[in-house]
Amino acid sequence: WYADGNCTDSSAKHSNVDYPSASAGGVYALALQFQESVETVLERYGGPRDEWFDTFAKPRSRADLITVTFKTVTFDAERAKLLETDKPVRFVLENFDGSLYKGYTLVLDVLKKEMKAILTKVHFELRLMFGIYVALLLFGFYMLLFRRTIGGSYSHTERSRDFVQMLPTHVLTRGEIQLLKDHYCQAEGDTE
């Protein structure tokens, strides 16, 4: 996350000097420490435990959040000191949009890149399979239809030759015989 590889860089805006082991343990350890700190803050400064688990564990509707309004806001210096002196409060405030958010963002970026790579590979493989399928169809079409048609035409040619050879040529004139011979023998180059 930061220049030194963990979340303890002193020049960083959100450094975790209160809990350095959480920062050194990665996003998971940081998330666990964040959850523990939130629970500590809620136990110290929130309402009774049975109330905040029911209300904070469930997402609130947008209408509930919009209806919250303040008529008067007063500055309490004692509570402001609490933000600087209480470790769990400071940790929650620093990490809510700091290291934890950045860590989760990095994890999401990696997951999105992996998902994109997998989908690209699947798309390529599907296109390849479709191409093979089309090639097999064309080859099957060639083998079944074209070859059978050519074979059938050869057999019909042979049958017609046999038919012509069985014709009584003594009835035909010499020109008609030569015309038949030229027609059936020109493909083979045979003049006989």
Image: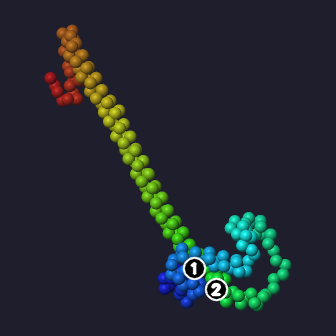
Residue 19 shown left or right of residue 51 in the figure: left
Which image quadrant is residue 101 in?
Answer: bottom right
Which image quadrant is residue 72 in?
Answer: bottom right
- What number is the disc on residue 91? none
Point out the tag, 2 or 1, that comes first from the N-terminus. Answer: 2
- What number is the disc on residue 87? 2
Tell me: residue 156, above or below residue 31.
above
Residue bearing the label numbered 1? 99
Label 2 crowding class (10 Å Cα cut-off): few <14, some 14-19, many 20+?
A: some
Q: Foreground residue, 6 or 35?
A: 35
Q: How many marks?
A: 2
Which image quadrant is residue 172 in?
Answer: top left
Tell me: residue 5, above or below residue 62.
below
Q: Circle 2 sits in a helix, a strand or a loop, which is it? A: helix
Tell me: residue 116, above or below residue 153.
below
Q: Foreground residue, 103 or 172?
A: 103
Q: Position of residue 183 (x, y in %)?
A: 24, 23
Q: Position of residue 113 (x, y in %)?
A: 49, 66
Q: Position of residue 17 (x, y in %)?
A: 57, 87
Residue found at x 64% / y 86%: 87
Instruction: Report the Cα–Cα distance between label 2 and label 1.
Output: 16 Å
Q: Position of residue 135 (x, y in %)?
A: 37, 44
Amino acid residing under circle 1: Ser
Q: In this orientation, does residue 41 appear?
A: yes
